Amino acid sequence: MTKHASQPTKIDQQLAGAQITVGGRTVQPMARLMGQQNSGGPAASGAGAWVRLEPIAVIVREPDGSERRIAVTNPTGQILRALIAAAAFVATISALLIAIARLTGRRN
Amino acid sequence: MDEKPTVALEPIEDLLSRLNVSAAFGEPVREGDTTLIPVASVACGFGYGSGYGRGPGKTPGQAKDKSAEGNSPEATTPDESEGGGAGAGGGGWVKPQGYIRISGDEVRYEPIMSMSLIPLAGMLTGAWCLFWITAAVRSFARK
């Protein structure tokens, strides 16, 4: 049996959707496709992939020809990420302080 | 059967070709002079694989040696036990994120905030921080 190394392939594409026309105004959605694709393996054959499609913006074209971009944000995700970052920061600093307190306590 | 089964990549390529912007932006819904376009984030993953193997068997040299010793033909037959298996699994989710509101001369994105998840995560983070800060203060107070 020949040995095959796994071959991960990163997926990162920006996609533009079909234009939607409402009252002379055109809206074009934009999204980002991220993920990874794997195939092969040392002992058996297999393949797998995970992908995530995130909306990023809509491009609005007005009837007068002007164009603007409206960002599509995810405030819930941003808040949760900020909370996780804060929790990790507090835990790291506290663990460092505890370690310092123990070290200085031993010396004294 | 010495050849390794080949991996079919078509399902992955098919999935990627089907995932387009319309998976994240829904069909426009018109209500009076307002049009709403639902927005969601989509994630999915899957994997499949197969394997095949057989027993260690005996090398031709070993088989000849055993024949010379006068063993029965059954004893000299290479071990032919073999087996294979295959499996697949996958999952995914779609999270509503907000909607695009087109009304009159205005186009706006209105996000949806999770009013249950954020307070819960806030309380958990508060308790976590309180635990660590208390532990740090106590370690200095012991000195």
Image: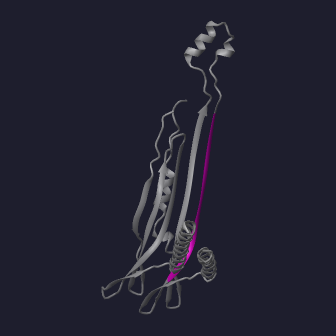
The magenta segment is: B83-99
Residue beneath the point at 57% across and 66% down: A106
- Give the position of the N terminus of chain B as an image quadrant: top right
Count of picture labels: 0
Residue beneath the point at 57% across and 46% down: B49
Q: Foreground residue, A82 or B92?
A: A82
Q: Residue A46 at what x, y percent from top left?
A: 53, 46
Above or below, B61 against A33 in this view is above
Please say whether residue B89 is one of the residues in the magenta stretch: yes
Q: Residue B48 at what x, y percent from top left?
A: 57, 49
Q: Foreground residue, B45 or B116?
A: B116
Q: Foreground residue, A55 or B141?
A: B141
Q: Residue B100 at what x, y percent from top left?
A: 48, 83
Q: Taken as a whole, is the magenta stretch helix, strand or loop?
A: strand
Q: Foreground residue, A107 or A75?
A: A107
Please say whether residue B84 is one of the residues in the magenta stretch: yes
| Residue A13 in the figure: left or right of residue A2 | left
- Give the position of the C terminus of chain B as an image quadrant: bottom right
| Residue B127 in the figure: left or right of residue A47 | right
Task: Determine if residue A27 is in view.
Answer: yes
Above or below, B70 against A73 in this view is above
Residue beneath the point at 47% across and 61% down: A35
Above or below, A89 against B104 in this view is above
Q: Residue B4 at what x, y percent from top left?
A: 52, 36
